[in-house]
Amino acid sequence: MTEQKKLGFILKNELSEIPRIAEAITQHGRIDNWPSIWISNANLILDELITNIISYGKLTDPNDTIHIDLINEDNQLVIIMEDRGVEFNPFEEVIEPDLDSDIGDRLIGGLGVYFVKILTSEYSYERIDNTNRIHLILDSPEE
Amino acid sequence: MLELEQEQNAYILKVSGRIDGSNAAEFQSKIQDSIPQEASTVILDLNDLDYISSAGLRVILLLAKNLKGKKGKLSMCSVSGPVKDVFTISGFSAIIPTYDNRESALSASD
């Protein structure tokens, strides 16, 4: 087992938190020698999930926060995201992204969660103690 | 975030920096304010765009739909790195003509 290195955030219920954590993740990832794909994918994944939670009003109390841990362990990046908002499993989102239609017919929506699903090797959601908990794993890129 | 230039018969939108969940609404209103109603050929120059999320893609799709509705067209140029990856996995590269550089995009729009 290799040394575990963790980066943690507590986010306010505001979309303006997204660029702040993107900057911090990028800086930390460079210092911790993350593969560059981890940095870009972690930023995109978290942007999509945070935007979902905040934009769709899943945090009903203005003082609600989102807790995020990114853990570099055993050649994997583990991301854990928790909030105490309304019960919400983003992976059960009904809308499937439309990837094939022409411009005129293409539906808007569903892409954010689709990105999370295809950029992670594992994703899961559970509701524990009135908390939404998302668990994600990014594998190391193949040599 | 956005600069408008006009070259030949095309309006070129130079998009720069980050377009994420926090500023996509601003990106959308800036596009609406920048592009004249009569514009039919619009090229997005993405050379200085560092990052885009699905919220930004949504704005670009709306622009493409709007232009198509008035028989115009949208194209993109100078897309690279993680931004290019996002356009590829979303399927946008397949529906919005994408060129290596601005010159190629302008030539194709003639």
Image: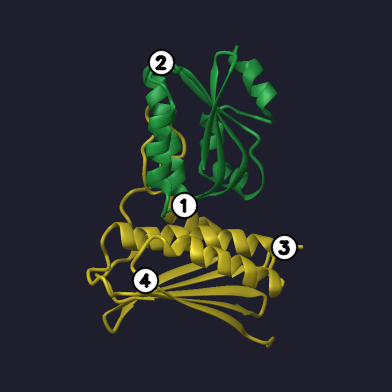
Chain colours: A yellow, B green
Q: Closer to the observer: label 3 or label 2?
A: 2
| Residue contact at pointers 2 and 4, CB within 8 angstroms | no
| Label 3 crowd bin: few (<14), some (14–19), many (20+), radius 10 Å | few
Residue type at mark 3: give it: Glu
Which percent across, then down, holds residue A132? 33, 74
Q: In the image, are marks 1 and 3 on the same chain?
A: no
Task: Report the Cα–Cα distance between label 1 and label 2.
Answer: 28 Å
Give me the disc on residue A142: 3
Q: Nearer the viewer, residue A98 or B109?
A: B109
Residue type at mark 4: give it: Lys
Give me the disc on residue A33: none
- Residue at position x 66%, y 16% from top? B107
Secondary structure of residue under mark 2: loop
Q: Specify whether A126 is left or right of A80.
A: left
Q: In the image, are marks 3 and 2 on the same chain?
A: no
Give me the disc on residue B38: 2
Task: Report the Cα–Cα distance between label 1 and label 3.
Answer: 28 Å
Vertical comparison of B65 with B20: above or below? above
- Residue highlighted by disc 1: B20
Q: Closer to the observer: label 1 or label 3?
A: 1
| Label 2 crowd bin: few (<14), some (14–19), many (20+), radius 10 Å | few
- Residue highlighted by disc 4: A12
* Disc nearer the start of the sequence (3/4): 4
Task: Report the Cα–Cα distance between label 3 and label 2.
Answer: 49 Å
Q: Specify whether B75 is left or right of B26.
A: right
Q: Closer to the observer: label 3 or label 4?
A: 4
Chain identifier of the residue bearing label 4 in the image: A
- Residue at position x 57%, y 64% from top? A23
Residue type at mark 1: give it: Asp
Q: Specify whether B86 is left or right of A100.
A: right
